[in-house]
Amino acid sequence: MRFILILTLLTFNFFYVKLTFSEEKIPLRITIYPTIIDKNVVGSSTTIINNKIIRENSHLPLGKLLSKFSGINFENLYSGVDVKSSVRIRGFGEQATRNVLILINGTRISDMTIAGANLSRILMEDVQEIEIIKGGVASVLFGDGATAGAINIITKDRLYLKDKFQIKNSLKSFNTKKQIITSIKHFDDFVVDYSLTNFETDGYRNNSDYDQSSFGFNLTKFNDDSSRSFIEFKHTDEQTRLPGSILLTDFYTTPKYSRFSEDFGTEKITSLKLGKELNLPDNNKFSTNLRLENKDQYSSMLSWGIRYKSKTTLNTTHLNSQYTNNESSSDSGITKKFGFNIYNSTYKVDANNWQYTQYINKAEQTIVEPSMILNIKDKKIKGLNYEVGARSHHYDIEVFNQLSPKILVLSNKEDNYAWSLGADYNIANENKLFGHISRSYRSPRLDEIITVGPSTNVNPLKHQFSHEVELGYEHNLSDQRYKISVFKTLIKNQIFYNPTSFANENYDPSVHKGIELELDKKISEKVDFNANSTFINSYITKGAFKGNETPYVPKWRANATLNYEIDKNSKFNYSYKYFGKTRAGNDDNYLLPKSKSYHISDINYSHKFKNFTFNSFVNNVFDEKYYTNLIIGTGNVGYVYPQAGRTIGLEIEAEF
């Protein structure tokens, strides 16, 4: 019934808005860029990764590219691929996948489970730019799950793409191979494009093979001079071996060792997206899209002679509509943005627990979120802009134990909200002061409620919410830019996994506070330098663990990049990363010392010759031995996930 209602709403949006056009006022065709933030969030620290930077770092996985920017950590369990990974923003460590939202063109790909968004599904060749929105203001922009911030990935606008056929092949250490075929073709007012990819690797460790194949198809129709409709289909098939963590002592002697030689997981994802975008008179805009996704996962793990098997199915429906009323249409100095989102997720798990007892659980979760953002230009004080936003959150979940007799385990309805107030003051000579205060939230994920063991013992979790304040200054000239921002976030009812009770619980309040420094400098016509540094103090403020630091969050981290344009066809790039010591996961009593810090250096050389681009690279040039995600295990010993040493690679790209 919900599905029929959503389709009806979408159809109504398609046709009703078209009928509101006046034939005398049809505007010229203008690109409808698929973003809600207009390149900046007033009062907040926002980073735009442009297409030039993306192309210069095409040899890097998306997660590693993101980690080159201030305030962002990226750590994966298995080196070289973006699966089993998390993007961590501003003091969120273990819980980052629940508090950082990943989107493509404003539509979330982070689902309603604790699993992080699978960044390997994103085809970087199709990305135009990436928006990084830090802090609780992202909750107002995009909704549930964006307490720490959001990553909005913007794809290339098909209106301006030329016809092309592109082939890209890459080879890297550990028998890593990747092939990509993409094509785009215009037919009058239609644009058709598709992509085929295959990625496989033996991995750095034993039992770490990974294989992914995917197909994507998009048909876009430019209906008239001011609107477009599109349909998009994607399918991904993925097999991942799971070597697991190893003893910290084994890391120094046999880092490639796997304790789980038989563990594996498979994932099949199919999605369909329908959308329409319109430029209305007076530069107003409207967009709406419906995304349907089916995700089937299966995992098999052998531990202490017990074979754990888990088969899960997740079906998600997301309706997203946005309307922007431009201030020029009313000459009021106020731009109004209205949004409406519906998420419906159905999750089913068939598994066995440590007593080898089968359980079959099913949950259905519905979230409805209307939102409004007002961008106000002060007419009395030149250069002063305000932004006020609010989002309402309506949450409904039911959980059943499907084993006979069928039992209703949990039924919960709850309302929440987010708001933000920000201001920018543009001073003469390209100086800007900015600041904001905000409130954000997140609801419990489906599999935070359906946990290991039969769900008859599940207790409802409270919704998490937080308050944040941020102040910053930015200086921006043609040959240099620097920025400093200071922030503090107070989080209440933060949801953590308790390793003692084997359940998710609401913990005591915690604080995330820090400072971010950024510098971009054009040293000469051919040489650019970029650097950033982040200090974060993230800790619990009350209760038995008062003062404990958040696991996996370093107090200090830094990045530096030097780009040298040898000539118009050749470029050289050097990157450096420092990652400080972090506390172990699940180690509330501080029984383990902090993990070791590490330094990573990468180099990259690219050369373009006619229709061909050659890209060679060496990652971790000095062969640094390091690990991620230190966790305390049975017997109070440390377990870690070893990462690869020096790796080399070559990419060849042909475009016709």
Image (spheres, rainbow, N blue to C red):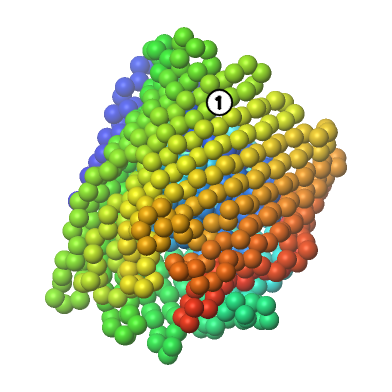
Q: How many marks?
A: 1
Visible residue check, residue 497: yes
Which residue is painted at 32% across and 62% down in the image?
505
| Image position of 171 with respect to 466: above or below | below
Instruction: Say whether residue 368 is left or right of residue 326.
Output: left
Task: Give how far across and how far down residue 281 sits, in percent.
Answer: 41, 18
Which residue is painted at 33% across and 53% down in the image?
493
Classify mark 1: helix, strand or loop: strand
Nearest to the observer: residue 133 or residue 590: 590
Q: Is disc 1 surrounded by few (<14), some (14 to 19) or many (20+) residues within 10 Å?
A: some
Looking at the picture, which amino acid does disc 1 mark?
Leu
Task: Give how far across and how far down residue 613 sits, in percent.
Answer: 76, 50
Nearest to the observer: residue 432 or residue 293: 432
Nearest to the observer: residue 611 or residue 502: 502
Q: Residue 25's quadrant in the figure?
A: top left
Which residue is painted at 76% across and 40% down in the image?
529
Question: Residue tagged by mark 1?
Answer: 433
| Image position of 139 with respect to 430: above or below | below
Which residue is painted at 34% across and 39% down in the image?
418
Residue extending furthest toward the bottom: 305
| Image position of 451 with respect to 636: above or below | above
Task: Give how far across and how far down residue 182 sits, in percent.
Answer: 61, 51
Q: Residue 248's quadrant in the figure?
A: bottom right
